Amino acid sequence: MKKTPSEWMYPKHQITANVKGYDELNQWVILDQTQVFKNQFAG
């Protein structure tokens, strides 16, 4: 499995993933099988 470059771990990067679950206390969505793409959203 390839690691995602750290410079891609900022807002506006496109991702795909499966929702594995959620944490109601912290209001987090837990993602699985995630891919982060180099391209960014313009808006």
Image (spheres, rainbow, N blue to C red):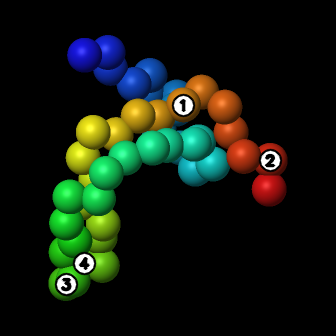
Q: CA distance from mark 3 to mark 4?
A: 4 Å
Residue 42's disc number: 2
Does the residue at mark 1 contact the one at mark 2 (Cβ under 8 Å)? no
Q: Which residue is mark 1?
A: 37
> Which amino acid does the dot numbered 4 rest on?
Asn
Q: Which residue is mark 3?
A: 25
Image quadrant of residue 29? bottom left
Is tag 2's residue or tag 3's residue first in the polypeptide sequence?
3
Task: Classify residue 23 as left or right of residue 4.
Answer: left
> Which amino acid does the dot numbered 2 rest on?
Ala
Q: Label 1: state its secondary structure.
A: strand
* Point 68% across, 39% down: residue: 40
Is tag 1's residue or tag 4's residue first in the polypeptide sequence?
4
Residue 26's disc number: 4
Q: CA distance from mark 1 to mark 3?
A: 29 Å
> Which amino acid does the dot numbered 3 rest on?
Leu
Q: Label 4: state its secondary structure.
A: loop
Closer to the camera in the image, 21 or 38: 21
